């Protein structure tokens, strides 16, 4: 049964959805029983996809911790990743201030778009694009790749981290903005490679920074 559309007024400023009872305040009637459901990467802030959900889909999402939608064309529930394995693992869900849309903060298990892209909206953030490239290098280990060399040689990784940090410090001491940008980018690259070799994914670093914010 659809919630009373007037209940949305109780969501001024938006509201976290943590239990089935929280869904009572959503305005399902406005969208004919459905509300837009936006999936956003909880760590990077990247908008991944837009779908629609009825109350049952949202109840299953909250209960299972995996995002469910309602297909308008097939008129049935479907879970993201049910065939591809690229699930959207729920971190938190929030209604907007009008109670007629839901934002799901998620951690994706793979590409969110059916095309194989990270996001249905394109424009992958630079850091996440670099993370994908580094993972591909770690998987394929192409000959002649500098990243391959770093991943294969722990001593080289540590040496380059020290060198790049020292070069950044020197650029900062000189007040050379162009060199600071260049050396900081070099250091960031080497930090990401070293982290990957140490079992830490770039997204985990973003999550750590987000937690400290």
Image (tube, rainbow, N blue to C red):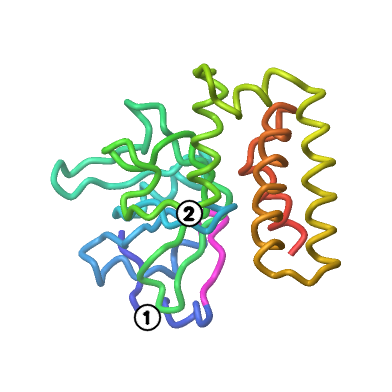
Q: Position of residue 88 (x, y in %)?
A: 46, 41
From the viewer's perspective, is residue 139 above or below residue 59? Answer: above
Query: Quadrant location of the C terminus?
Result: bottom right
**Residue nearer the viewer, 179 or 185:** 179
> Please, which residue is most extreme toward the left here?
73
Q: Which mark is residue 125?
A: 2
Disc number for residue 6: 1
- Which of the two residues, 147 or 198, is positioned nearer the viewer here? 147
Residue 56 within the segment the image draws in magenta: no
Mark number, residue 145: none
Q: Residues within 10 Å of mark 1 (few under 14, many from 20)?
A: few
**Percent x, y of residue 121:** 32, 55
The residue shown at (38%, 32%) is: 81
The image quadrant where one finds the N terminus is bottom left
Which image quadrant is residue 160 in? top right
Q: Residues within 10 Å of mark 2 (few under 14, many from 20)?
A: few
Q: Is residue 162 left or right of residue 135?
A: right
Q: Nearer the viewer, residue 174 or 27?
A: 174
Q: Tell me whether circle 2 and circle 1 mark residues in contact (CB < 8 Å).
A: no
Q: Is residue 110 left or right of residue 131?
A: left
In the rendered image, residue 20 lying in the magenta stretch gets the answer: yes
Query: Which element is circle 1 on?
Result: helix
- On the image, the x and y values in percent for residue 130 come to 53, 43
* Residue stretch rendered in magenta on the structure: 14-21
Report the number of numbered marks.
2
């Amino acid at each position: 049964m659809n919630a009373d559309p007037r209940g949305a007024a109780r969501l001024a400023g938006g509201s976290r959805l943590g239990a089935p009872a929280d869904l009572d305040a959503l305005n399902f009637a406005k969208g004919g029983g459905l509300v837009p459901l936006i999936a956003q990467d909880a760590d990077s802030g990247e908008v991944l996809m837009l779908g629609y959900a009825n109350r049952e889909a949202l109840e299953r999402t909250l209960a299972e911790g995996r995002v469910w939608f309602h297909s308008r064309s097939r008129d049935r529930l479907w879970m993201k990743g049910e065939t591809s394995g690229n699930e959207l693992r729920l971190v938190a869900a929030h209604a907007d201030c009008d109670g007629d849309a839901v934002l799901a903060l998620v951690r994706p298990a793979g590409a969110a778009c059916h095309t194989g892209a990270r996001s249905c909206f394109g424009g992958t953030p630079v850091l996440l694009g670099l993370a994908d490239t580094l993972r591909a290098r770690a998987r394929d280990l192409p000959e002649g790749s500098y990243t391959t060399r770093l991943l294969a040689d722990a001593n080289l990784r540590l040496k380059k981290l020290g060198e790049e940090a020292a070069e950044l410090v020197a650029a900062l001491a000189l007040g050379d903005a162009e060199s600071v940008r260049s050396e900081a980018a070099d250091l960031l690259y080497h930090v990401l490679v070293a982290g990957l070799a140490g079992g830490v994914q770039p997204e985990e670093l973003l999550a750590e920074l987000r937690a400290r914010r």
